[in-house]
Image: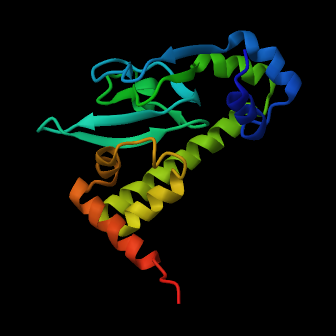
Amino acid sequence: MGLHNFKKFLIEKGGLSEEDFFQIQSFIQVKELSKNEFLLKQGDICSHFFFVEKGLLRMYALNEEGKENILQFATEGWIVSDRGSVYFQEPSTYYIDAIEDTLVVMLDEHFIDQVSKVNLGFRKQNEHLLQNHIRHLYKRISQLLGASAKSRYLDFVSMYPDIMLRVPQWMIASYLGITPESLSRVRKALAEENFKPHK
């Protein structure tokens, strides 16, 4: 099946061994998405977490004017989901779609149960990953409320260093909560700051 990134994730982040991974392979579900195809739409109940083996996803909501507000990008090795919809079985207010042709691993409670039977420490590791995700969400909220456009952009570059050329500028601006024009000004100012003329 391959799934190099998912195997690496379970071993490095989930505490599984090579043998553990071999035992749970039959429980792994994958889904291939074409560019612009949806994994989740507003009003659907989300029943999975989505691990990106290959490709690029985005999660977004629509405001009252119908404008997209991007909450998260998910590239190789990332997990994205509407956790509230999964946990409370409520209709989602979000969309998740593919920016590129994408291969995802579909993770649900049944899969987590099966992995936990093979490796007793997996649930604890999974809890750690959840708490780390919540920590990042708090940081993101704080940035959106109080950080400058420049600071938000630099944090974005640090968090997503490999997708700058894979994502249109307007999507980056949406994620940062600024206009595309503001993003252009920030990028221009940073380029000028970093330009060192030769003597």
Q: Residue at x 37, y 21 (%)?
A: 40
Front residue (pair 178, 22)? 178
Looking at the image, residue 40 lies above or below residue 170: above
- Front position in the image: 31 or 79: 31
Please determine whether, in this image, residue 77 is positioned above or below residue 37: below
Most extreme residue toward the left, as rendered?
Answer: 65
Tell me what residue is drawn at x 45 percent, y 50 percent: 137
Taking 70 as reference, is 57 above or below it? above
Residue 140 location (% of width, % of height): 41, 55
- Colour mode of the rendering: rainbow
Quadrant placement of the N terminus: top right
**Splitting the image into 4 quarters, where does residue 11 fall?**
top right
Seen as rendered, the residue at the extreme right is 19
Asked if residue 29 lies left or right of residue 42, the reply is right
Q: Residue at x 88, y 22 (%)?
A: 19
**Left or right position of 121 against 163:** right
Residue, x 61% and y 36% (percent of image)? 77
Label count reads 0
Provide residue 197's location: percent of width, then percent of height. Answer: 48, 83
Instruction: Examine the rendering and report whether any part of residue 146 can be seen.
Output: no
Q: Is residue 97 visible?
A: yes
Does residue 196 lie above or below 44 as drawn? below
Question: Residue 171 placed where, x, y %?
Answer: 32, 44
Q: Which residue lies most toward the front here?
A: 199
- Residue furthest top as drawn: 26
Q: Position of residue 139 (x, y in %)?
A: 45, 58
Q: Is residue 147 left or right of residue 62?
A: right
**Side (left or right) of 94 relative to 21:** left
Q: Nearer the viewer, residue 189 or 134?
A: 189
